[in-house]
Image (tube, rainbow, N blue to C red):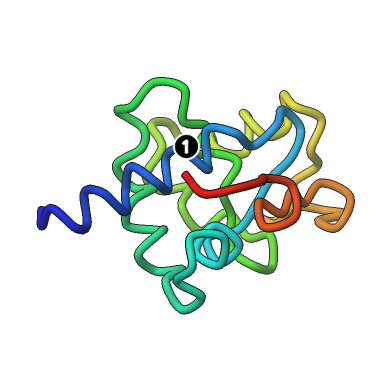
Amino acid sequence: MKPENQNFFQKVYAVASQIPYGKVTSYGAIAKYLGTTRGARMVGWAMRGAGAIENVPAHRVVNRKGLLTGKHHFDGTNLMQQLLENEGIVVVDNQIQDLDKHFWDPFTELEGDL
């Protein structure tokens, strides 16, 4: 991995680790917060490796429509969905229901730079 990517990935993990219990955010929202508005895919790549890192709730990061697009990176058939449902989030057909109610925007919730 390129050093600049590693630094970016660490910033992604720092943001993701602050997503509150019962809330979700999107790849694009994290990218926007980090100043890379078109970097949602890069955030997705970072989150793919987040499972091996403690205290990074990767299950709380979904696509902009609330779809569990990263679910195949979790062990087990429906682990991502189960983790979200354990936090009171309803998931139907791999999509979070009432996304606006559960959405956490790092751009408005976090202050300062990482």
Q: Residue at x 59, y 55 (%)?
A: 62
Give the percent coordinates (x, y) of residue 47: 39, 47
Residue 73, placed above or below residue 2? above
Residue identifier under label 1: 77
Q: Residue at x 31, y 49 (%)?
A: 9
Q: Amino acid at mark 1?
A: Thr
In the rendering, at what x and y percent does residue 10 appear? 33, 42
Q: Quadrant of residue 83?
A: top right
SS under mark 1: loop
Q: Front-most of 40 and 99?
A: 40
Q: Where residue 98 sits in the image (x, y, percent)?
A: 87, 54
Residue 35 on image: x %, y %: 48, 68
Left or right: 86 in relation to 18: right
Viewer-proximal residue among 92 and 65: 65
The residue that appears at 46% across and 52% down in the rendered structure is 70
Mark 1 burial class by Cα count in 10 Å: few <14, some 14-19, many 20+: few
Q: From this viewpoint, which residue is outermost toward the front?
A: 112
